[in-house]
Amino acid sequence: IGILAGGIAHDFNNLLVGIFGNLDLARLFISEGNHTEALTTISRGLSVLDRARALTHQLLTFSKGGTPVRKIAALEPLVRNAAKFALSGSNIACVFSIPPDLWPCNLDENQISQVIDNIVINAQQAMPAGGAIVISAQNIAIEHSRHFILREGNYVKISFKDSGIGIPKEIMPRIFDPFFTTKQKGSGLGLAITYSIIKRHEGAIEVESEPGKGTTFHVFLPASAGTITSEKTAPLEEFKGKGRILIMDDERPILSIVSKMLEKMGFSAVTAPNGDEAIRTVRHEKDSGHPVTIAVLDLTIPGGRGGRDTVKQLLKIDPSIKAIVSSGYCDDPVMADPTQYGFSGRLNKPFTVEEIKDVLRPLVDKG
C-alpha cells in the first residue's frame, strides 16, 4: 500500500506541476495581452487534466471493480489510437494486422484503452533496446467446453506480441497479482487493472512467453450483434439552447462554473447544494411559471439527499424533466446504466463544455 500511495502521489504531483504551471503562464500572457499564447497554454493545461482524469478512472477501476460504461464500438480504431499514443516518443515500432471485417464489441472505450495502454507499455519496457510490437486481431467462435473461462459464443481476439526479454516461468502465475512487479519503479497495478477490466467485460486474457524470445498477450472480448452508431457533434458555437436548467452539487465552485457554461449556451441556471433544496427549487420555479426542463444532479451528496433519490421526487413534480446524473465515481451502477434509474444522460466528472454540450443536445432536440 505504501508503494502504491507513493506512486499515486508522485504521478499526481507531476500532473499538478503541469496544471498550475500552465495556468500561471496563461495568466501572465493574458495580463500582457498575448491571447494567442494564453490559449495555447490553456490547451496544454487541459491536456494535463485529461491525463489526471484518466489516472483517477484507472484507480477507481482497480479499487471498486469499475462497472463498464458500455456502447457498441469498432475495435480497430480504438486499438490503433491507444497503441500509438502509448508508444509516442519511444523507440518501439508498432505493426498492425487487423482485418476490415472485425466484429464490433459492446465495451467501455476508456477501460479498453487502459487495457491496450497497459499491455503495450509492458511490451515496450520489455524491449529496452528497441524493437517492434505486432498487434493482430481476429474473429473467433468459442464452442462449448473449448475454453475453460469463456462461455460459448462469438469473440474478438486481440494479440500483442513483443520480442523482449520474456517472463520467467517461476513468476508467470503472479503477473496479474496486485502490487506484484519486477520493475524498480513499477507499482504492480498495470496488469492487475487489465485483468479486472477484461473480467468485467466477460472476456479473458492469456499470456505465453519464453525468456529471451518475447511475450504474447491474448485478449478475448465478446462480440456484439448490435450496430455501431456514429456520434457527430457540431461546433460549440452552433449549439444554443433555451430554458431553465437546475444544477445540484455540494461544491460551490462546481455550481458557479457549470452555471457560467450553461449561460454561454443560452440557458438560464438555478442551483441547489443538495436534493432537498433541489426539490424545493423545482417546485418554486414551476409555480412561478419558469419550469425547470433539465436537471443536472450530483450522484453523491455527503450528509444529504443525492441524485439517485432526488430524481424520483423531481419526476413526481414534473414527469417531463430530463435528468442528467453527474459523478466522479464512474464505477457506480447508476453511471453505468442511468436510464434504469430515471436519468436521461450522464456526465463523468471532471467534464468539459464540449461534454456538457454532447449530453444536452439530444435532450434539447427531443424536448
Image (tube, helix red, strand yellow):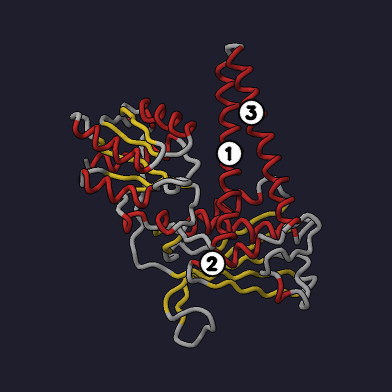
Residue pointed to by mark 2: 198
Residue at x 68%, y 65% (from the top left corner): 178
How far, Cα to Cα, is label 2 from label 1?
26 Å
Quadrant where the N terminus sits is: bottom right
Residue at x 33%, y 39% (from the top left corner): 278
Could you tell me residue 139's position as x and y percent?
47, 71
Q: Choose the circle earlier in sequence order: 2 or 1.
A: 1
Residue 49's mark? 1
**214 or 206: nearer the viewer:** 206
Can residue 104 be spotted in the picture?
Answer: yes
Residue 131's mark? none
**Contact (Cβ within 8 Å) of mark 1 with mark 3:** no
- Which amino acid lies under the numbered mark 3 shown in the image of this protein? Asn
272 left or right of 119?
left
Q: In what element is the residue under mark 2?
A: helix
- Which amino acid lies under the numbered mark 1 shown in the image of this protein? Leu
How far, Cα to Cα, is label 1 from label 3?
11 Å
- Which amino acid lies under the numbered mark 2 shown in the image of this protein? Ile
**206 or 186: nearer the viewer:** 186
94 left or right of 166?
left
Could you tell me residue 345's position as x and y percent?
35, 48
Q: Residue furthest top?
A: 32
Residue 22's mark? 3
